[in-house]
Amino acid sequence: MKTRHFSSICVGCVVFALAAALQVLITARPLDAAVPAVVAAAGGLLFHLDPLGAFFLAVVGIGGLPAAIYGFSYTEHYEGHRSLPVFGVMFNVFLLGMSLVPCAGNIFTFVTAWELMSVASYFLVMTDAEDVDTRQAGLWYIAMTQFSLVVLLPMFLLLAPAADRTSFADLRIAAAGLSPQLRGVVFLLALIGFGSKAGIVPLHVWLPRAHPAAPSHVSALMSGVMIKLGIYGLIRVVFDFLGGGPAWWGALLLTAGSLSALLGVLYALMEHDLKRLLAYHSVENIGIIFIALGAGAILRSYGLHALATIGFAAALYHTLNHACFKGLLFLAAGQVVHQTQTRNMEDMGGLIKAMPQTALLFLIGSAAIVALPPLNGFASEWMVFQSLLAGTSIPRPEVAIGFPVAVGMLALASGLAAACFVKAFGISFLAMPRSMHASEAREAPESMRYGAWLLADLCVLLGVGASVVVPALYRVLESIDGLVPDPRLTPAPGLWIEAPRALGHLSPALIALLLAAIGFGTWLIVRSVHRRPFRVSDTWGCGRIAQTPRMEYTASAFAEPLRRVFAELYRPTQDLTVNAHPDSPYFVESITFKSEVRPWFEEAIYDPVVRAARRIAARVRLLQSGSVHRYLVYVVVALLVALASVWWTP
Amino acid sequence: MIEMLLVVGQTLAGVALAPGLVGSIRWTKARLQGRRGAPLWQPYAELRKLFAKERVVSHNASWLFHAAPFVVFGTAVAVLSLVPVVFVPTGFDSIGDLFAVVYLLLLGTFFLALAGLDTGSPFGGMGASREMTVVALTEPTVALSIFALALTAQSTNLGEIIRQTVAEPARALGPGHLLAFAALFIVTLAETGRLPVDNPTTHLELTMIHEAMVLEYSGPYLALVEWGAALKLLIFFAIAANLFLPWGVAFTPSPVALVAGFALFVVKIGALGVAVAVLETRVAKLRLFRVPELLSASFVMALLAVLSTFLVR
């Protein structure tokens, strides 16, 4: 079977899923399906697609369709490769799993879909398993994803006993009767379990490892879509089942979000591997979504429902937007990596001339993620800011400190993101090529660009059309009792974003019009005043004769001022060796400089865990001696234990 | 309709006034330093000269280098149209609030920094790197100043803040107001490339920030970039003058109110210009790595502004 067969199946299924999602979103009537015969003891397979699930299913479709189209030619260089058939099957299983998670209607279906998604993505990460780094990344990934399951299962076990059956509708009713302490425990387990899937600090460690290792359209799916299902799970359990909770839940979400946003972007700044940089930005954006959810949860706990809804709408909006621009950025980065054979930005450069379309795609994605108007990132970040400003309505001193600090951290994160993407785009695409491969790069094949253009168009449309998107998000939230208590709050679509009780007014469409009119007008005026053609000449260089790529500003140099400013956090290690001529120390033969930024807090948390796991594994290994006799003894002992336990059970 | 015309009119007036503001700061500075100084209209003469000159473009440059000056100038004019300079419109200002103002200006800076990298010149890269560092570190202060303003006025839209402050001066004027003004003033110096963050008159590339970034521009492109920078200065002055001291701004389109509003606006930004000129004569440029200290001081002021507004309320 050829790659295109696999890819065609993907495209077909994703289109079908999108259609189902849109139907539910438009009619606001849930779709139901059940296969009770499959594992009947666990309740069978039960599907229930309500508007919230449909929204996330639409996110899966929006991220999945371009990735599947992109896969047509991307996987061609794996043709004949041993891992290709596995890849084709797993890509489809991965998409299937992701599509089923938001449709699941009971615990069994949810966990099955969740695991399909997790295990299939593990195989996709391991596509280049010959590489040591990839195997390392795969190990981290499977460990973290199974950790998430290990936390989620007890969470469901706490919820389930109170319910008659394990369907979500029963869990919702049962959760109302839980004691406050138990509800708190369920919330914490959901935060840890779904948070590690979403990639909040400090559970984000797998993201910067697994994303660069996977093929680019898989990274686009994992970063754009899969981590969003963590957000889905969190909203489903915390706000749908539990119906929200006390203020400290929101405060915890807000803190985790602010830390993720800031640390994500700070580590992205130090990263010169294009795909790792994007992976760290996913941590940042998940942080922004958590900030919005946290603000909403706090406002809700004080009974300010209209204001809380701004936060929830902002969270959903940013989820959708991030799926678009992060998918776009990973697809464009994939084309670059494909052409230049490297992920290191310092070996790229000048690609805007060789790959003009890819460059434009990456530029649109960058502008969107930096929240520049009139693109979609700006509209959702504006909503997040508005939800934080709404905190002024709560007259409590801890809120008076917490919300402004969150505003400051979010603003700093977005400023640093701007610096980071000037670096990412400027160093990779502008000026002169910095390596042989970069100078020989060619534009990517058409099918790889189609998928990315789809997402780029969405980035523009979702931004300019924000005033239509926001009312639609309110209607999604209406489907959950916990989120919009009064449907009259839902604004009507128009030219302005009409979030009820928001402090600000904004019309992204008119801003876009204003910008276009003024920019074009200026161009016309300048052209009529100044008619002479421009002269092409050398870059000015203080009298030097030839300009070489080695004279260009590098990514490390670009990030250096910020590395010094945040030196306390980065704690860079430096290693400088100067080899002087034997005759005189003033004649330097060579200088080697090595500097590294290691995320020390990751090591502080995970090193003890890894060491403990190794120690336990070494002990357990004694059991597995390789001797058949000993294994026979185990079988006999196991049999005896089984018989004894049957004997003793009444 | 008449409001629309007034908004267009005040925007055009601002565009025309901006180079004069730069000229007057330079003139005041020269007088303070015991020099005679160039006349007030010198920046206009420079712009005219630049528009007539040839554009020289590096062969490394891409289309982005050609587009950036229009983005910079276009965003600056768009932002100016959102700021009530002389007259507070009732509908037009709600197109964008203070966050839109901040992010539109960031759009211009983003493109200018990319253009700085586009020619492959190390100076351009250095300028871009430093500019983005400074901009990133000013963002939290700006956001918190907006927070402080929104707290009293219950709005982030500029016209609404002005209306609320004029309607209830007792509620608006407090320590929070003053602290937020001080924080925003430091941000103004940093964002518009004034001393002690950046020296607008330097001729040494290694100490430049903004000037290094635009080093490769010439002719009409340079004119647009310089004009855009002047507009940015005017915008920050107008925000500082009209949001924190809104008295005199016209609410009705009557000729008397408009003339008085314009005269008072010129007086207000003139006073701010003199303040900047005095400051630039008195202080030396900070080392780049001392700038974060100044900016974190402004952040703390903005945070205190929010807290005190919360408590006083």
Image (cartoon, coloured by chain):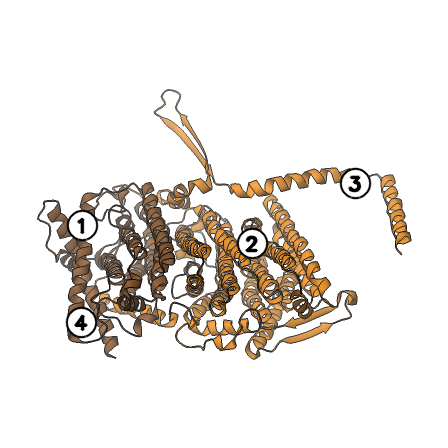
Chain colours: A orange, B brown
Which mark identifies residue A199? Answer: 2
Q: Name the residue under label 3.
A: A624
Q: Name the residue under label 1.
A: B277
Do labels 1 and 2 touch, CB within 8 Å?
A: no
Snapshot quadrant of residue A91: bottom right
For the residues marked 4 and 2, what is the alpha-carbon distance in whole angstroms?
A: 55 Å
Point out the image quarter for the C terminus of chain A. Answer: bottom right
The numbered mark, 1 or 4, whose residue comes first in the sequence reads: 4
Query: What residue is shown at x 50% (from left), y 71% (from top)?
Result: A473
Helix, strand or loop at mark 4 = helix
- Say above or below: A481 vs A284: below
Helix, strand or loop at mark 2 = loop
Binning the other alpha carbons within 10 Å of mark 1 as few (below 14), some (14 to 19) or many (20 upward) gives: many
For the residues marked 1 and 3, what is the alpha-carbon distance in whole angstroms?
A: 80 Å
Residue type at mark 2: give it: Gly
For the residues marked 4 and 3, what is the alpha-carbon distance in whole angstroms?
A: 90 Å
Residues at marks 1 and 3, common chain?
Answer: no
- Say above or below: B157 vs A346: below
Residue type at mark 4: give it: Leu
Do labels 1 and 4 touch, CB within 8 Å?
A: no
Do labels 4 and 3 touch, CB within 8 Å?
A: no
Query: Disc 4 is attached to a residue of which chain?
Result: B
Q: Mark 4 points at which residue?
A: B258
Measured as percent of width and height from the top left, residue B120 is found at: 34, 48
In this rendered view, identify the residue nearer to me: B121 or B228. Answer: B228
Instruction: Kindly report which numbered mark, 1 or 4, lies closer to the viewer in this rendering.
Output: 4
Q: Is residue B192 visible?
A: yes
